[in-house]
Image (cartoon, grey):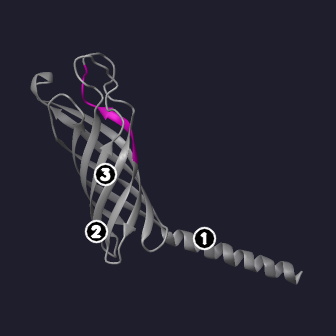
């Protein structure tokens, strides 16, 4: 009976220590900032479009230097169409974006990050020639960034997103519709 009691105490104390250690490494936060986006590989004239992003952060510290960070962001992207194609009309696409980055942080707060990003099209404001929707539902690519985080959790970062999937689902013989999103972001964030 004493052995069973001792085993239960050891099991409870190790479970408690594990859960405390796990939750000490888990962090949540908020993030918001500005986007500057354009299309890559388009054979028509475009100009960059200013937008924004905002959302939540979930981060897990692997050790003192490395962490995995997942974000859930509402992000506006797109481009300003120029020339004969559109009479300077904005093509705005709003996504629910989920970047998952591996982050390396130095002792003095500077960090670099990189990883994949997936997005789901939430809305679009462009009326294509046909009645079909213009944008593909899924947008995927890679992100890389740099920034600085204070010990209290407040930080600033810059990130570049390079899309790898096509933006448009419409196919045309006169223009190239196999173009991708490219977005530069500047953000303020706070991690608890």
Front label number (2 vs 3): 2
Q: Residue at x 44, y 65 (%)?
A: 67
Residue 16 drawn above or below residue 137: below
Front label number (2 vs 1): 2
Q: Residue at x 33, y 63 (%)?
A: 112
Compared across the picture, whether 110 is left or right of 192 comes to left
Q: Residue at x 20, y 36 (%)?
A: 79
Please state, as top left, top right, bottom left or bottom right, where the N terminus lies in the image.
Answer: bottom right
Q: Earlier in the sequence, mark 1 or mark 3?
A: 1
Q: Earlier in the sequence, mark 2 or mark 1?
A: 1
Q: What residue sits right under mark 2 in the picture?
A: 148
Q: Which residues are magenta?
A: 117-128
The residue nearer to you, when weighing 122 against 157, is 157
Element marked by disc 2:
strand
Q: Residue furthest right?
A: 1
The residue nearer to you, when weighing 88 against 165, is 165
| Residue 165 picture location, percent across and down | 36, 36
- Estimate how packed mark 2 is, as few (under 14), some (14 to 19) or many (20 or more) residues with alpha carbons within 10 Å: some
Which quadrant of the view contains residue 28? bottom left
Element marked by disc 1:
helix
On residue 68, which mark appears? none
On residue 19, which mark appears? 1
Q: What residue sits right under mark 3 in the picture?
A: 54
Marks 1 and 3: CB-CB under 8 Å? no
Q: Residue at x 25, y 25 (%)?
A: 176
Q: Earlier in the sequence, mark 2 or mark 3?
A: 3
Compared across the picture, whether 30 is left or right of 86 comes to right
- Estimate how packed mark 1 is, as few (under 14), some (14 to 19) or many (20 or more) residues with alpha carbons within 10 Å: few
């Amino acid at each position: 009976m004493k052995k069973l009691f001792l085993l239960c105490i050891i099991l409870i104390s190790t479970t408690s220590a594990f859960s405390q250690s796990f939750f000490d490494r888990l962090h949540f936060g908020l993030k918001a900032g500005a986007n500057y986006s354009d299309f890559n590989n388009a054979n028509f004239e475009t100009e960059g479009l200013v937008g924004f992003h905002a959302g939540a952060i979930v981060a897990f510290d692997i050790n003192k230097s490395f962490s995995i960070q997942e974000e859930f962001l509402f992000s506006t992207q797109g481009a300003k169409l120029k020339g004969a194609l559109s009479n300077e009309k904005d093509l705005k696409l709003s996504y629910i974006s989920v970047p998952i980055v591996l982050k390396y942080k130095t002792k003095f707060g500077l960090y670099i990050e990189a990883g994949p990003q997936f997005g789901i099209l939430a809305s679009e404001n462009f009326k294509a020639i046909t009645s079909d929707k213009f944008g593909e539902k899924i947008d995927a690519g890679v992100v890389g960034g740099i920034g600085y985080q204070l010990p209290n959790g407040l930080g600033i970062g810059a990130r570049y997103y390079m899309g790898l999937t096509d933006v448009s689902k419409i196919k045309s013989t006169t223009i190239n519709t196999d173009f991708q999103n490219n977005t530069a972001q500047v953000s303020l964030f706070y991690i608890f």
